[in-house]
């Protein structure tokens, strides 16, 4: 029996940069570049079970009209009455995830002396593909935390936001929100932000297969592409990606970090050698992890 090799794929018309449609679709599909995704998610889920057992049941507060528009608060016993706050915005391709899935990221923050807040919000399918609705929810969640920090012993003047993957995209929409116009709040309510493995320019995302479930419009691409609103960025940020992420996720991080630097805004850019999209998130859970160490430094807890 003679072994035969599959015929090489014929490259189609270019859609974005040097990529055809298949290449662009793959560049916005993490599973193509991270075949160990199920294994990493299994580790994450097991770590969350352990963290829940240690941290206990969180306080839950509703910030919007529906039950999903709520935040889970894990309080630190080290400084319960006036602690810094970290709000985590989860990822999941805008389609998946709940706050309860990410408790494994709270323990490091709580142990360092800060309150950990994990936001819940609708997924893209629940809002009919309207990404603006999701951005409005996470912005509203942060506004609620700022306005109500005293309810759980938080210091609203030490408010930080962290996001990974599509959560980093939504976090970039938070740090480039016009707080005065949209919420009547000071423009600098966020004191620092960690953006890991996100998307900051929606033009190529709109051209990819993600447009099958996200109803992109010109207005959404304009408002929710953080790279277009750096004039609204009023806090230091950390931007990170792994070397084993998709080419587009690496480029998105490089270009965004470069634009922030060119705009004269404080930026720390981290490249995680050997980490794929899902593995780099795990480093947020440890004070000795690549991103965990930087987050604590950003929050002045290390």
Image (cartoon, helix red, strand yellow):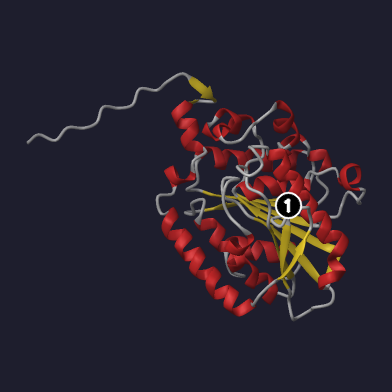
Residue 143: which quarter of the image?
bottom right
Of the pair 300 and 62, the residue shown nearer to us: 62
Decide if residue 4 is in sight here.
Answer: yes
The picture quadrant where one finds residue 70 is: bottom right
Identify which residue is drawn at 66% across, 42% down: 127
**Residue 231 drawn at (x, y percent):** 83, 39
Residue at the extreme front of the image, as rendered: 66
Res 266 seen here: no
Instruction: Residue at 78%, 52% (x, y): give it.
Output: 65
Question: Is the C terminus in the top left, top right, bottom left or bottom right quadrant?
Answer: bottom right
Circle 1 packing at 10 Å, graded few (<14), some (14-19), many (20+), is many
Q: What element carries label 1?
A: strand
The answer to which image quadrant residue 272 occupies is bottom right
80 or 263, nearer to the observer:
80
User: Is 202 drawn above or below residue 75 in the view shown?
Assistant: above
- Tell me residue 149's x, y (percent): 84, 66
Residue at image x 64%, y 38%?
128
Residue 43: image location, x then y, percent: 47, 65
Q: Mark 1 points at which residue?
A: 237
298 above or below 137?
below
Tag count: 1
Residue sitting at 77 percent across and 48 percent down? 175
Which residue is outermost to the top?
13
Q: Is residue 107 left or right of residue 141?
A: left
In this rendering, is residue 228 above or below 76?
above
| Picture quarter with the N terminus | top left
Q: In this view, does 186 lie to the left or right of 3?
A: right
């Amino acid at each position: 029996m003679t072994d035969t090799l599959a015929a090489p794929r014929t490259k189609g018309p270019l859609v974005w940069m040097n990529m055809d449609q298949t290449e662009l679709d793959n560049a916005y599909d993490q599973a193509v570049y991270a075949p160990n995704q199920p294994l990493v998610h299994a580790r994450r889920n097991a770590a969350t079970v352990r963290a829940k057992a240690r941290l206990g049941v969180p306080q839950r507060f509703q910030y919007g009209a529906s039950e999903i528009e709520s935040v889970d608060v894990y309080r630190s016993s080290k400084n319960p009455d006036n602690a810094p706050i970290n709000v985590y915005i989860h990822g999941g391709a805008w389609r998946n995830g709940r706050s309860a899935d990410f408790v494994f990221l709270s323990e490091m923050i709580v142990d360092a002396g800060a309150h950990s807040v994990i936001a819940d919000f609708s997924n893209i399918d629940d809002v009919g593909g309207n990404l603006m609705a999701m951005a409005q929810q996470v912005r509203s969640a942060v506004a609620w935390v700022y306005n109500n920090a005293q309810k759980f012993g938080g210091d609203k003047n030490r408010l930080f936001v962290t996001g990974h993957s599509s959560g980093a995209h939504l976090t970039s929409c938070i740090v480039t929100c016009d707080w005065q116009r949209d919420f009547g709040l000071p423009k600098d309510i966020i004191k620092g932000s960690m953006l890991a493995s996100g998307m900051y320019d929606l033009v190529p995302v709109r051209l990819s297969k993600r447009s099958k479930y996200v109803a992109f419009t010109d207005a959404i691409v304009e408002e929710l592409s953080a790279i277009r609103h750096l004039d609204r960025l009023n806090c230091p940020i950390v931007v990170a990606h792994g070397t084993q992420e998709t080419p587009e996720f690496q480029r998105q991080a490089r270009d965004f970090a470069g634009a922030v630097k060119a705009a004269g805004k404080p930026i720390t850019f981290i490249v995680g050698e050997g980490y794929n999209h899902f593995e780099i998130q795990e480093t947020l859970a440890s004070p000795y992890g690549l991103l965990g160490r930087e987050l604590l430094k950003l929050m002045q807890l290390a």
